[in-house]
Image: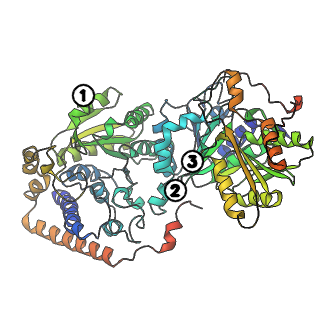
Amino acid sequence: MKRNLSYVEAVREASDQEMDRDKSVIVFGLDVDDPKAIQGTTLGLVQKYGHERVFGTPLSEDAMTGAAIGMALAGLRPIHIHIRMDFMLLAMNQLVNIAAKSHYMYGGQVNIPLVVRSMIGKSWGQGAQHSQSLYSFFMHVPGLKVVAPTTPYDAKGCLIEAIRDNNPVIYIEHRILHFQKGYVPEKLYTVGSGKARVTVKGKDITLVGISYMQVECQRAARYLESVGIKAEVIDPIWLSPLDIDTIAASVNKTGRLIVADNDWITCGAGSEIVSEVLEKLQGKREIKVHRMGFAPVTCPPTPPLEKLFYPDGRDIASASFDLVKGGKNKWVPDEQIDLKEIEFKGPF
Amino acid sequence: MNARFYRSLYRIRRVEEEIARIYPTNKIKSPVHLSIGQEAVSVGVCLALGSQDIVFGTYRGHALYLAKGGNLKKMIAELYGRTTGCAKGKGGSMHLIDVTAGVMGGSAIVGTTIPQAVGYAYALKLKRSSKVVVSFFGDGAVDEGVFHESINFAALKNLPIIFVCENNSYAIHTHQIQRQANPKIWERVKSYGIPSERIEGNDLFKIYQKVSNVVKALRSGKKGPIFFECTTYRLKEHVGPNEDYHLGYRTREEAEPWLKNDPLQKLALLVKSKKRQKIEKEVEKEIEEAFEYAEKSPFPKDSELFTDVFKN
């Protein structure tokens, strides 16, 4: 019988098992040791490993990121947690100027084994500053690794990989994905970079879904079945380094690519993926591409506008239909109740 | 002891004078922020430390690097951009590092290494180590939010760290009184619950004595952190090898008392002339060899561009 865990439980288990295995692993961030325990992802760790290895911090994202780097320089493997990714903007100097660069600018003398966990929010009025993804900011910088696992299985395997990596890794969760359940082995295992996962096989169009948008791409593939279109869906999992070969091989087969990003489109991960695929396939294969993502506005909290802000499975299916059939067809599938997003209820 | 102080101080001054002398030849293609005038703070603090102790510095870091025992040849080679440099030519003057000497680097972004020093101290405490960390920064760093966040956390966790503010009155060309409502930095720091005092006038002996006492206390279990504000004066321009009184943001008259009070000159009087000459001769030879080493060292190979991005 396969063991099913939630994404939250998978993250918690990975942290627990790694802390147990390696006493240089420590966990900190605002509220990691409070009763809510970062949506449950750090539950029980302080009781098991004590207040020195698991501690809440002052509201000092900048200094605590610098402190994490200092701890890493001293041989620890810190996991620094932000309950929303938006807060990482307060830590950009330390992440970009020091964490990313130290190994290079010190000629390989030091390295920074650091994991920064953070969550992207969505719905229940998360609004302007609780909804941003920002991963393209980090993908831009040499020296940082970026991972955005979608499933509980990958959440555990990627977190263990990130903890064991000798470099800074930006580990990105999505609040809605926290409720996903799936098979998670009890043993320790890693899901490393360099291998994107084909989650649905198809031949007509390639859909790349990043973070939560992976779920919506899989829903789009289901909607497209009703009109006889077979979509191939890919989860890149690791955004940096990115496995472009798996994506390009799929597009070489289908001739069509949609990247559905959980972020704004301009200069985003989707733009990067489309560009790299075009560079690889130009002159070999005529392809059609399309990028989808947030509306190019600040995320509004009011439900009717927020619904328009995010693309969903039906929007992706509609865009896919146009790419496959050509032209603007205005086909939008009727909503299927089993392909509807869970209603996330707050407060957080 | 005076001879030890003199050697360190003389060595740093002469290395930087050589850097300034060579600079117009364009062999050093790196911004240099010279410590000339400020060396006494680094020397006073570092001679009170052991080689196992850890320091984090700033972009004006030549004095700290040398005072703490950083390798001179590797430093000059780094300024020359050579592969034998302390960072293989990938760091430059602002990012000098020598891990074996406990010199953990510097940053071009003011205030940036302060929290790293604090994090390092946290790790030492967790490991029950008897080492101490010293975080060096200037009065400009005190303007930065990260300074306040960092000292608060260090105080909260009672970390084995000494904060040393090298107050030279200027952030580039802007005076402290144009930037800080209360320029008594040590007084503000006290409000965080950190024992704190100001040591005036580039006083090497006082700095050494006070830091020695604190280091001893920290090693024997006294709770940190401790804060020292050391007033000092930069005699050269913010960046580059020259003086800058012509710019008009400060006057030569302002510098006069500091020149008269030059710790190097004062110390020279305390070391017997024979001993002093021996030190000077040895240091001059060492400096000559270091520059020769840099000149003769190769530049990095093209393939070095792509190494050291990630550690395996």
| Residue at the disc numbered 2 | A111
Residue drawn where x is 25% and y is 45% of the image: B172
Please indicate whether residue A254 sits to the left or right of residue B216 in the image. right
- Name the kind of residue labelled 1 in the image: Asn
**Label located before the other in sequence (3 or 2):** 2
- Name the kind of residue labelled 2 in the image: Asn
Residue drawn where x is 46% and y is 44% of the image: A93
Q: Which mark's residue is nearer the viewer, 3 or 2? A: 3
Image coordinates for residue B160, horizontal then vertical, percent: 40, 41
* Distance of label 3 from label 2 (alpha carbons): 18 Å
User: Chain under label 1?
Assistant: B
Residue drawn where x is 66% and y is 24% of the image: A348
Looking at the image, which is closer to me, A220 or A158?
A220
Please indicate whether residue B182 sits to the left or right of residue A142 in the image. left
Secondary structure at badge 2 equals: loop
| Residue at the disc numbered 3 | A138
Q: Quadrant of the N terminus of chain A?
A: top right
Whether residue B256 is visible to the viewer of this picture, yes or no, is yes
State the mark number for residue B56: none
Please indicate whether residue A160 sits to the left or right of residue A320 in the image. left
Residue at mark 1 shares a chain with residue at mark 3: no
Please indicate whether residue B74 sits to the left or right of residue A308 in the image. left
Image coordinates for residue B143, horizontal then vertical, percent: 32, 35
- Name the kind of residue labelled 3 in the image: Phe
| Residue at the disc numbered 1 | B182
What's the coloring here?
A: rainbow
In which image quadrant can residue B295 be found? bottom left
Q: Which mark's residue is nearer the viewer, 1 or 2? A: 1
